[in-house]
Every structure is written in structure tokens, then in C-alpha cells.
Amino acid sequence: MADRFFPNEMPDFVPETTAGETITSNTRDSLTKLLYLPYNTLSEKLKRSALDLKETVVRETWGLGGKRVKDYTLYTGALGTAFVVFKAYQVTKNENDLKLCCEIVKACDYASRDSGHVTFICGRAGVCALGAVLAKLAGDEKLLDHYLTQFKQIKCPSDVPNELLYGRVGFLWACSFLNNHIGEGTISTRHMRQVADEIFKSGRQMANKVRCPLMYEWHGKKYWGAAHGLAGIMHVLMDMQLKPDEAEDVKGTLRYMIKNRFPSGNYPSSEGSESDRLVHWCHGAPGVSLTLAKAAEVFGDKEFLQAAVDAAEVVWNRGLLKRVGICHGISGNAYVFLSLYRLTGDMKYLYRAKAFASFLLDRAEKLISEGKMHGGDRPYSLFEGVGGMTYLFLDMSEPSRARFPAYEF
Ligand SMILES: [Zn+2]
């Protein structure tokens, strides 16, 4: 088990009051030095590193390929690069970033025109939704109209799954993204409601065989995690106006998961699985913790907050993964602490996010070059590679506004 992650040898907590003090001269370890830096000093370092990394990500995934797009997705492809550049624009307000972003999305629009995938992260909805938001920011009405028209032509076929990466909630998330950035009603409540109804209908049908109000399958497996399973589906459903019986089913599903978690506090990747190995956003405690934190915020129940805190403890102990990305890497796991910091204001969680980011800043490049850390199959992508680390570093400059990319609002 230990070969999936580095043992976390960083102090559990360093309060900001002592963080600024000079550390004793016998502490020469560069990572420890970063942990003791005042927050603003560290976040400046992270931002500088992120802006350099962004240039590398753009060069490797866009410039070197002659600006032709093979993989258009946000997950591993060009749209992920555009999302990183968009984040950089939000932090620095550099107009060149906005222009570059529009150019990349235009190429993604062309590359995805015949795609049957409907979601934000792995489908055409992501391209059209991000395109529309950029067009609005650039003040280009004609382009905005183009992307919104394209978006409205996306239909969820009846056999589409329900999960986040390829299914209905991944499409719903794109609708909410448009409504959040362009204005309520950009995508009508009625349209979103129809999709949500399908999700509840399908979840209640599948739940007949288990003691959980909602259950879903993807490729024959009842997944629990954020990418393909319950955690991701419940997360997106909580963005909707839920009817009382629907809210009860969401809460009941989360209580079922809490009751059936592993003794270690981690969560199975699928129903009935006894393998307590994965501590990823996609499978395991990190994705579930983000959903529970959201449930605590939406429903106000203390039991969800406590469960989110318990899951975050697993992430602190076993979440220093040997990968850098957000899907199954250290960067994604850092967002667990950022969500709890936002929810509770507890500085311990800000410190823990800072610790994971510091570990990456100090060691990721070296560990990858030495082969001790996996560079990712798509090493510069948003979800599997350095793109995700870049996004996290940019988010650390305003931690109370940090959101797991393409997942949290
Ligand atoms: Zn993953």
C-alpha cells in the first residue's frame, strides 16, 4: 500500500503566528523552510512558479503540436490547457491570456464538432460553455451567440450514463457553469430539471437492490467516487433546487456511504469493494470529502461536516500521492483542505493545503526526473499532470476563493 503514496512526515500544523519566525539554523531542509514561511510569501512563490509552469503547459500541449488539437477534452486535452490559461487570466488579468484562451477553445470547437460526448470534463459541453464565457468576457456578442447555440444543440441520449465524466451530471454541471458566469436562466431551469428528473429516476430504480436511496452503475460497476460514482453525482445534484423527497434521498445516500466506509476512514471505490487502496479525487476519501463538505454547507448537518473532517484526515495521512495531477494526484487532494478551510475558517486546513502545495513546489520536478514520482500519461494535462499543479498554485493566491477546477463552484 505504501508504494502508492509518500509517508507524510510534515508537521501536523504550524500556526501562522510562529510561521514567520526564523527557524533554527539546524533546520536546513528546504521543504520545512517553505512550511514556516508566512502565507503571503509562500503564495507569491507559488504564483511565480505557476506562471512559469503555465508557459510550459501551453508550449507542450499547444505550441509544439502546431496548434492542432487531437484530444480536445478538459480532462487530458487542449481544453484543460485553456482552463489553466483562463485561471491565469482571472489571477493576473493579462489580456493576452484571454486571447490565447479563445484561440485554444476555437480549435477545440472544431475538433469536437462531431463528438457524441456531452459533459464539461470529457465532452463538447465543456468546449461550448467555456467558449461562451470567454466570448462574454471579450465582449464578442456574435461569438457568445455561436457557443450558446452550439451548447443548446447538445442532447443527452437516453442511454447516457449518469456519472460526472461522461454522463448526465457532467452535462448539468456545464449548464450551472453557464448560469453562474453568464446569468441565471442562460440555460433554463426547465431544461435542467428534465435532466435531473432522469438522474433521480435512474438512481431510484437501481437502488431497489441495495439499502441506499440512490445508486448508479457505470460499465457494470456501482462506483462511489467523484469521477464515475455517487460522490460526483450527489455533488452536482446539490447545485440543483431539490424537492424535499430528493433532498432526503441525497442525504440518505451520503449517510449510507458514511456508515459503510472502511474502518480506516477511507471510502470504497465501488459498492462491495474491500480494497482499501485508493485515496484519490476520482476514487476514495478525497472526492467523498468534497461532497460531504458541500452537504454540510447545503443542508447544515453537523454529521456531514464531521464525516468530511474524518475523510480529510485520511487524505492528510495517505494522500501525498506519487502523482501531481488533480484526478489522482497531490494537487487534487490539496483541494480537500481548501474546501474545509472555506467551510470552517480553521487555519489548520489552510496550513495543510499549503503543506501539500509546498511539497509539490519543493519536490515534484526532482522526484519526477528521478522516476520516484509518476509524470502522468498525459504529463502536462489538467487532470493528470502539471496543468493541475499549475491550477492549484494559482488558486493558492486567494485560498478562500479556490475551487476544484470544473467541479466546485
Ligand atoms: Zn483519477
Image (cartoon, rainbow, N blue to C red):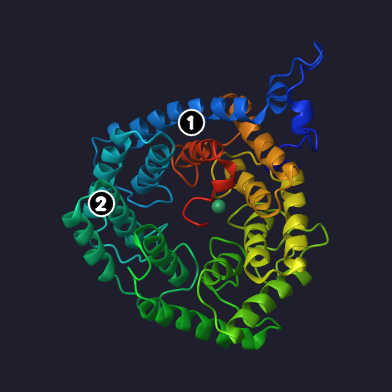
Q: Residue 160 occupies which quadrant of the picture? A: bottom left
Q: Please, is residue 297 above or below residue 107 in the view?
A: below
| Residue 229 horizontal/vertical position (percent) | 57, 67
**Tag 2: amino acid:** Ala
Q: Please, is residue 273 above or below residue 392 in the view?
A: below
Q: Residue 301 occupies which quadrant of the picture? A: bottom right
Q: Dot 2 corresponds to which residue?
A: 135
| Residue 320 visible to the viewer | no
| Residue 404 horizontal/vertical position (percent) | 54, 51
| Residue 195 horizontal/vertical position (percent) | 42, 78
Q: Does label 1 or label 2 sit earlier along the sequence?
A: 1
Q: Residue at x 40, y 76 (%)?
A: 192
In the rendering, which numbered label is found on residue 50?
A: 1
Q: Please, is residue 245 above or below residue 265 in the view?
A: below
Please tell me which residue lies in front, 308 or 322: 308
Q: Residue at x 36, y 66 (%)?
A: 118
